[in-house]
Amino acid sequence: MDVSGRKRFITVDLLGLILRVLITSASVPEVAGAKLNVQSFNFIR
């Protein structure tokens, strides 16, 4: 099935401030998009 459009995965901090926005095609499953968003985020230690 060919789905057109975009999905947005937004990462925020505890205050609700936007840290990252990942935009993918609509055909990407939500679980895969969420994993991409978390894996590509560099955590500061």
Image (cartoon, grey):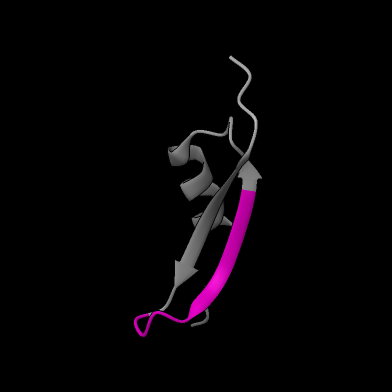
Q: Name the foreground residue: 21 vs 3.
A: 3
Residue lying at 51% horizontally and 76% vertically, measured from the top left: 18
Residue 37 found in image quarter = bottom right
Is residue 12 on the magenta stretch? no
Magenta region, mostly helix, strand or loop? Answer: strand
Residue 32 placed where, x, y %? 50, 39
Q: Which residue lies furthest to the left in this view?
A: 14
Q: Residue at x 63, y 19 (%)?
A: 2
The residue closer to the viewer here, 3 or 28, is 3
Q: Give the range drawn in magenta.
A: 14-23
State the image coordinates of residue 8 (x, y, percent, origin top left): 55, 53
Give the residue at x 45% y 40%: 30
Compared to residue 15, the image places residue 34 above or below, namely above
Q: How many marks?
A: 0
**Quarter placement of the N terminus:** top right
Residue 19 x %, y %: 54, 75
